[in-house]
Image (tube, helix red, strand yellow):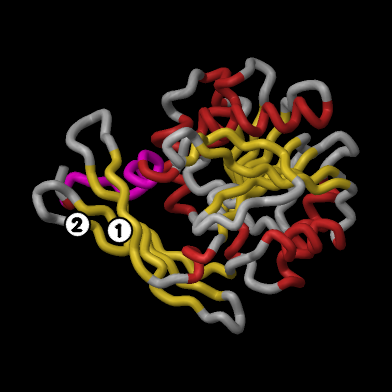
Amino acid sequence: MSHGECDRFRLYQLAVQNPVAEIDLIDRIFEERHGRLARALREDFCGTAALCAEWVRRRADNRAWGVDLDPEALDWGRRHNLRPLSTEQRARVRLIRGDVLSVKTPRPELVVALNFSYWLLHTRQALLTYFQRVRALLPPTGLLVLDAHGGPESLRLGTETRRIHDPLGDGFDYIWERADLDPITGRQRCHIHFRFDDGSSLERAFSYDWRLWTLPELRELLDAAGFSRVQVYWQGWDAHDEPDGWFVPVERGEPDEAWIAYLSAEP
């Protein structure tokens, strides 16, 4: 693969997303909390809506709404993630270009904001408003699911590289760069680059202006928004000290150099 042949959204989905595993986890959390599976999901900051597409594939009565401000990502998602669905499946998905702080949708049972996307909300007031709107939208047996990351590594500038397998050809390198971080505001600027075996690259394929939210801040804001129960799910480790991808509810985390966690919040 070379720069001229690449599609940045496709590369992102290969490198960053795993909708099957994410829906597996979301289903498990919801069933543990409410004793049944959810049917209606809203994916906030949905980008190409890969999660929405997997959601309607999963069960014949599942419905999904995806909300994002980026028309390019939404259009790509319609062409590449929704078009391969059956006509009946596509009828159960709606993608909406809108602001999660003001958009109106039918009432879901699940709201998810993954890939740290809600970190685009930089202030406590903005994030609190978002959480309040989600809580008001959810039914009493609904659920909000978020992810977060942290650890000392998240405070260091630099790059991390992973080799990604491409089922349609040669692999490529995914490079995550933390380019700037302001300890006073928590604002950070990060980039995703892709590099190919022919020596070409796609620099700054995606760039992010995020606030690095901590778990205590998130739990306090969810509590202030009126959620009745907030649970953190921590990733385990295998015998080789590698992340095993299995997230379990915990009351205390581990001081790892770099960690990923999920949070669930009940209205």
Q: Residue 201 carries which label?
A: 2
| Residue linked to disc 1 | 193
When the figure is inspected, residue 85 is found, relative to residue 101, above or below; the finding is: above
Residue at horizontal 73 percent and vertical 43 percent from the top: 250
Q: Nearer the viewer, residue 253 or 203?
A: 253
Q: Does the magenta stretch include residue 205?
A: no
When the figure is inspected, residue 246 is found, relative to residue 207, above or below; the finding is: above
- Residue 128 lies, in percent from the top left, at 78, 64
Q: What element carries label 2?
A: strand
Residue at horizontal 62 percent and vertical 32 percent from the top: 25
Q: Which of 155 and 201 is in front in this view?
A: 155
User: What's the residue type where badge 1 is placed?
Assistant: His
- Residue 226 lies, in percent from the top left, at 89, 55
Residue 100 visible in the displayed image: yes
Instruction: For the N terminus, give its image quadrant.
Output: top left
Quarter of the view holding residue 205: bottom left
Residue span colored magenta: 4-14
Q: Is mark 1 on a helix, strand or loop?
A: strand
Question: Which SS type dominates the magenta stretch?
Answer: helix
Q: Nearer the viewer, residue 264 or 168?
A: 264
Instruction: For the C terminus, give its image quadrant.
Output: top right
Asked whether, in this view, residue 209 is left or right of residue 174, the answer is: right
> Which one is earlier in the sequence, the residue at label 1 or at label 2?
1
- Residue 151 lies, in percent from the top left, at 55, 61
Badge 2 local density, few (<14 within 10 Å), some, or many (20+)? some
